[in-house]
Image (tube, rainbow, N blue to C red):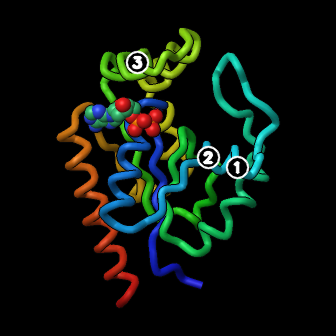
């Protein structure tokens, strides 16, 4: 069954602005913000909590089972700091948010991240780990890299995704 609404992955290093973007895009488009952390917690798609990395040890099979009905229906914003686990057939657009390392450092420090997590995330951002992962997992033409340093970037990015969503819907309706 073709979907009448697109599924969009919003990914990037922790702190780049995934939640902020998804909330704004959801408000503007009516797409549903699916925060993977919440799904993992609520559906217990994990094998416990990694204290050092301060994140869940995710059971990917369980997570994908929990997401499948939503993805099949369409109209979701998948918000997660990884992306290559989502099957290609689910995904219409991948937004990789990027952030200047000093800005990102300040955002993570404000969250009180432990030094190990802060440093690992910062290295990942500098090495473009998420961008590479997205480019390897999906067709090049559906992966977009957007900056998220300032509030103006956020506003501009949201406008772009809203316009893309409208165009996608028109295209499907044809
Ligand atoms: P993530 O969900 O990727 O971890 P977030 O949306 O929670 O990130 O944002 C982390 C913090 O940074 C939060 O206080 C909001 C702020 N922020 C995010 N994107 C921003 C932007 N483009 N301009 C200014 N502040 C931003």
Q: What kind of element bears circle 2? A: helix
Dot 2 crowding, Cα within 10 Å, few <14, some 14–19, many 20+: few
Residue bearing mark 2: 38
Dot 1 crowding, Cα within 10 Å, few <14, some 14–19, many 20+: few
Q: Mark 3 or mark 2, which is nearer the start of the sequence?
A: 2
Residue 67 in view in this figure: yes
User: Residue drawn 53% across and 72% down?
Assistant: 74
Tell me, yes or no, whether the two marked residues, 2 and 1, touch with CB atoms within 8 Å.
Answer: yes
Residue closer to the observer: 167 or 79: 79
Q: Is mark 1 within 8 Å of ligand 1?
A: no
User: Judging from the image, what secondary structure is the residue with disc 3 in?
Assistant: helix
Where in the figure is residue 104, as x and y percent of width and height?
37, 23
Compute the Cα span from label 3 to label 1.
26 Å
Mark 3 Cβ and ligand 1 under 8 Å apart: yes
Identified at 52% across, 54% down, the residue is: 78
Q: Residue at x 74, y 52 (%)?
A: 43
In the rendered view, would you say 147 is above or below 174?
above
Q: In the figure, residue 68 lies in which quadrant?
A: bottom right
Q: CA distance from mark 2 to mark 3?
A: 21 Å
Where is residue 159, by image quadrant?
Answer: bottom left
Label ID, residue 110 = 3
Name the quadrant where ligand 1 sits: top left
**In the rendered image, is residue 131 in sight?**
no
Find residue 87 and report its horizontal and vertical position in percent: 63, 59
The C terminus sits in image quarter: bottom left
The residue at which mark 1 appears reads as 42
Q: Residue furthest right?
A: 47
Q: Residue at x 57, y 17 (%)?
A: 117
Q: Quadrant of the N terminus?
A: bottom right
CA separation in Å, label 2 and label 1: 6 Å
């Amino acid at each position: 069954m073709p979907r009448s609404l697109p599924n969009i992955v919003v990914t990037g290093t922790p702190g780049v602005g995934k939640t902020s973007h998804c909330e704004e895009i959801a408000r503007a488009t009516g797409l549903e913000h699916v925060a993977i952390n919440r799904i993992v917690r609520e559906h217990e798609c994990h094998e416990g909590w990694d204290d050092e990395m301060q994140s869940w040890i995710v059971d990917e099979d369980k997570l994908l089972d929990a997401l499948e009905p939503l993805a099949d229906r369409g109209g979701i914003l998948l918000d997660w700091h990884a992306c290559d686990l989502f099957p290609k057939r689910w995904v219409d657009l991948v937004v990789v948010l990027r952030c200047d390392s000093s800005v990102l450092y300040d955002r993570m420090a404000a969250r009180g991240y432990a030094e190990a997590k802060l440093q690992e995330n910062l290295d990942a951002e500098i090495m473009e780990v998420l961008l590479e992962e997205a480019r390897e997992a999906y067709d090049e033409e559906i992966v977009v890299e957007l900056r998220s340093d300032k509030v103006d970037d956020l506003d501009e990015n949201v406008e772009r995704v809203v316009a893309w969503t409208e165009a996608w819907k028109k295209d499907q309706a044809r």
